[in-house]
C-alpha cells in the first residue's frame, strides 16, 4: 500500500527546495527568522526587534516557502491517491511522511548542524557572538516537537483537500 520510494523522492524534493530557500534567506535576510520560535531567548533579547519593513519583507519571502511546503505534499498526495486508490488513512500517512522529511532535515541539517554545531558568522546576529543560545540544541528540538502537531493538521487538511478533489 505505501509507496516508500514516492515518499522518499517527494519528501526529499521538498526538503532540498526548502533548505535552499532557507539558506538563501538566512544569508540574504537573516532577520527574517528573528522570532521567538526561531531564535533562543538570550539572542532574541539582545537583538532589536524586526522593523515594520522587515516584517513586510518576511511576508513576501514566505510565499515561495509556503508554496513548496504545501504544493509538494498536495501534488504528492494527489498523485499517490490517484495511482494507488488507497484509503484516506493511507493517504494521510503518506502526506505526513512527505511533510516529515523536510521537517527532519530542517532540524538536523539547518538547526543542529549549521546553526548549533558549525555556527558560521552569517547566522550570528551582530553583538551576540558567543551567546549560549547558538549551542542550545534543545531549543530547536522543543520547537520542532511542537511542530509535530502542525504536521498532523497540515496532513489532515492536505488529505481532506485531495479527497474532495478526487
Image (cartoon, rainbow, N blue to C red):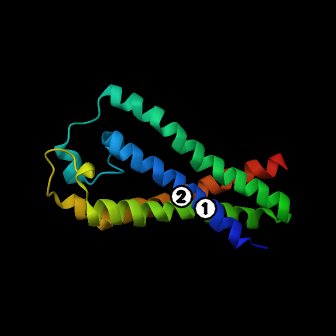
Secondary element at tag 1: helix
Residue 163 against residue 49 in the figure, above or below: below
Check if mark 2's residue and mark 1's residue have beta carbons within 8 Å.
Answer: yes
Q: Residue at x 34, y 39 (%)?
A: 29
Q: Residue at x 41, y 28 (%)?
A: 56
Q: Is residue 166 left or right of residue 105?
A: right
Q: Is residue 69 left or right of residue 25?
A: right
Q: Quadrant of residue 100?
A: bottom right
Q: Is residue 108 left or right of residue 152?
A: left
Question: Which numbered tag is attached to residue 11?
Answer: 1
Q: Which percent across, then down, holds residue 106?
A: 44, 60
Mark 1, Cα crowd under 10 Å, few <14 / some 14-19 / many 20+, is many
Residue 128 against residue 91 in the figure, above or below: above
Secondary element at tag 2: helix
Q: Which percent across, then down, holds residue 84?
A: 84, 65
Q: Mark 2 = which residue?
A: 15
Amino acid at each position: 500500500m505505501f509507496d516508500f520510494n514516492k515518499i522518499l523522492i517527494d519528501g526529499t524534493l521538498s526538503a532540498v527546495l526548502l533548505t535552499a530557500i532557507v539558506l538563501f534567506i538566512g544569508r540574504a535576510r537573516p532577520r527574517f527568522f528573528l522570532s521567538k520560535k526561531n531564535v533562543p531567548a538570550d539572542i532574541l533579547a539582545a537583538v532589536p526587534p524586526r522593523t515594520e519593513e522587515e516584517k513586510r519583507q518576511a511576508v513576501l519571502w514566505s510565499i515561495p516557502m509556503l508554496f513548496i511546503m504545501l504544493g509538494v505534499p498536495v501534488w504528492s498526495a494527489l498523485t499517490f491517491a490517484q495511482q494507488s486508490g488507497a484509503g484516506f488513512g493511507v493517504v494521510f500517512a503518506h502526506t505526513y511522511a512527505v511533510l516529515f522529511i523536510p521537517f527532519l532535515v530542517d532540524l538536523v541539517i539547518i538547526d543542529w548542524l549549521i546553526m548549533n554545531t558549525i555556527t558560521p558568522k552569517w547566522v550570528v546576529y551582530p553583538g551576540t557572538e558567543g551567546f549560549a543560545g547558538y549551542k542550545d540544541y534543545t531549543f530547536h528540538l522543543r520547537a520542532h516537537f511542537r511542530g509535530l502537531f502542525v504536521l498532523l493538521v497540515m496532513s489532515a487538511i492536505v488529505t481532506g483537500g485531495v479527497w474532495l478533489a478526487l
